[in-house]
Amino acid sequence: MDPRSLVLAALLAASGPGAASQRAGGGTDDAAAPILAVTGAAFALSVADLDASTAWYESKLGLRVIMRAPRNDATRSGVVVLQGGGLTVELVRHDDAQPPDTVARSGRAGPFVHGIYKVGVTVEDFDAALAGLRSRGVEVAMGPWPKRADQPANVIIRDNAGTLIQIFGR
């Protein structure tokens, strides 16, 4: 089993009844609706600051917390799962996680490294998604690039921790 799955399973088991339904605060009114309508995309990130990353995905992408498993001594981790518009994002904060450059030198991986290189999702209405991202002040890291014969319209944004997220149109 993948180490991230083990961490999530342990957190769910150790956090007790009702933990999955706890709602995190901190969302803003302008983030009431998801702005990325995707079809079944999901990714998980190891993050240094669980609260800051949760707030970013709520306010910038309009996702809502569907599960929060607080940090506990058994797993030394905390998890927040957010969803909206067909996208699921799992954020994990593990006590032993380190930035990628530190981990690369040690040879460790899995939930012990913060972030990943890049994730991507495909949306039905690229122009509406891009307008929504811009209206919420989301940083555009690269692009946008128009649709061409050899590629869909796309843009790469950056989250609060620097993770790149590529948005593709259909």
Image (cartoon, helix red, strand yellow):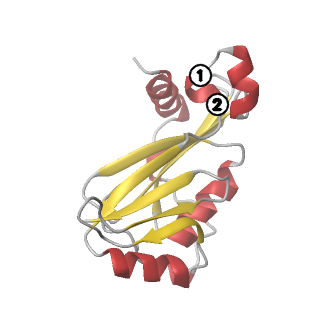
Do callouts 2 and 1 mark residues in contact (Cβ within 8 Å)?
yes
On the image, the x and y values in percent for residue 4 come to 49, 28
Which residue has dot 1 on it?
109
Mark 1: amino acid: Ala
* 10 Å crowding of disc 2: few (<14), some (14-19), many (20+): many
* 10 Å crowding of disc 1: few (<14), some (14-19), many (20+): some
Q: Is 141 displayed left or right of 83 in the figure? A: right
Whole-angstrom CA distance, mark 2 to mark 1, is: 6 Å
Quadrant showing the N terminus: top left
Compared with 101, 120 (above or below) is below
Note whether residue 164 is visible: yes
On the image, the x and y values in percent for residue 101 come to 73, 30
Compared with 32, 4 (above or below) is above
Q: Is 109 displayed left or right of 21 in the figure? A: right
Question: Image quarter for residue 48?
Answer: top right
> Which residue does the image show at 67% across and 27% down from the upper left?
76
> Which residue does the image show at 43% across and 21% down from the upper left?
2
> Which residue does the image show at 47% across and 71% down from the upper left?
144
Q: Secondary structure at mark 2?
A: loop
> Which residue does the image show at 37% across and 69% down from the upper left?
36
Which residue has dot 2 on it?
113
**Is residue 28 or residue 35 the one in the foreground?**
35
Note whether residue 88 is visible: no
Mark 2: amino acid: Val
**Is residue 28 or residue 153 the one in the foreground?**
153
